[in-house]
Image: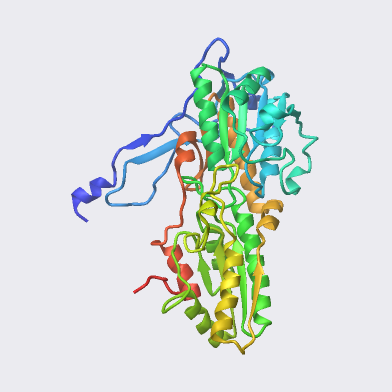
Amino acid sequence: MMESEISKLFKPIYLKDIPHYAETEELQSQTNPLDQNPFFDTRQGFYITHSDVVLRQIGNEVSPPPRMAYRRAGPRKHIFFDPSHVRAAIVTCGGLCPGINTVVRELVVGLWQLYGVRHIFGITGGYRGFYSSEPLPLNPHLLHRSHNLGGTLLQTSRGGFDLLRILHSILSHSFNQVYIIGGDGTMRGAVKICDEIRRRKMNVAVVGIPKTVDNDVGIIDRSFGFETAVEKGEEAISAAHVEAESAVNGIGLVKLMGRSTGHIALHATLSSRDVDCCLIPEIDFYLEGKGGLFEFLAQRLKQNGHAVLVVAEGAGHNIIPRTHSQKEQRDESGNLVFLDVGLWLKSELNNWWAREHPHDLFTVKYIDPTYMIRAVPANATDNLYCTLLAHSAIHGVMAGYTAFVTAPINGNYAYIPLEDVALANNPVDTNDHKWSWVRSVTNQPDFVRR
């Protein structure tokens, strides 16, 4: 490597900072109450300092983009919110995801036990709950066993974002900390709340905790609930494999979550090793002709007598016949409504076999575990992850930071600007080693017409 190329590896690192409430009449710094907590040793090295950062890129690219860093998450020596004056609101938005109850529980437990906060409220029913219902007082006793339950005790909904009514609720209830749990659409709403709070010069801290079972939030290592979804997805694949193997010319068809990204389908395929073909939104595929899905499945049925097909819910969206109105239909969150790719594929597979092999037995067993997966409690890995997310969020807010998302980057928890996460996505990179690994396991074609 040339000396000039080596020097490129050491380009300057730029800190992507987040807003902080400097000392004012209302917010004055005080020593962190963790100093008086008998369970913590707050001597040298316990508190995070201003020089502690987390690098976004750690690979040694010869010509890397500008190197970015974020503030490291964790407790600070001084806090800017007096715990006795804190009124915290917690809201969950969007669809269900394993681990929501754990995040809510640990936010309450962390605020209560680490910092002595006693005024904690749940906003029920998503964003619309700010203005459609009264806040629910929360305490550790009320949520004692909630981490063992699926769903969300606070209830949730899509849509319902009304900025002015939400701000009015925050003001009328004197909330000065708002913890928002949701996906990319929820985070975009949180950005608008932060912008209006800063415009009005309100001393209200807002933190986002990214929730999406699809793992489609960018920048961060992964979103909570993803590990549980992969584990349960693998169980569905195992059931489909048994069904397919037990039938003559049997196909087990499993649809897994993934509107815009195929991370769950990809990881469940790799963990299963029983999958013959994995279809994700990031790749195009076709059914008929040489190199198409039908030709490949015919070969597998001839070789093994059965096949297992895994498809992410957003795969094939561009080739499923739809009317003009169906193409324009959106849900309450503003997302395009997709037709069921699993049902469509099942129908197409049956039609294909009836045309090509009208006198041979054939069975398609279709499994859609979507709502079962979303509703289960988090597994051990996700439960631990949710706890660390919640406590990292609390430490950052109490230290006076706002308009940030807390999540791990390269294994280290960081505070990332809320707007950056709201705009970032996380597609499967079909040019990287992981997708090559999938194809080496399934031996499926690349579905490129030649």
Q: Residue at x 50, y 55 (%)?
A: 261
* In front of the other: 1 or 233: 233
Q: Is residue 444 above or below residue 335?
A: below
Is residue 274 placed above or below 44 in the rendered structure? below
On the image, the x and y values in percent for residue 109 come to 71, 34
Q: Which image quadrant: the N terminus?
A: bottom left
Residue 32 in view (yes/no): no
Q: Residue furthest top?
A: 25
Position in image of residue 413 (x %, y %):
52, 41
For the C terminus, give its image quadrant.
bottom left
Tell me if 190 is positioned left or right of 68 in this view.
Answer: right
In percent of width and height, residue 251 lies at: 61, 77
Instruction: Identify which residue is drawn at 73% across, 27% down.
Output: 135
Q: Quadrant of residue 379?
A: bottom right
Q: Count the labels in the image.
A: 0
Q: Is residue 237 above or below residue 385?
A: below
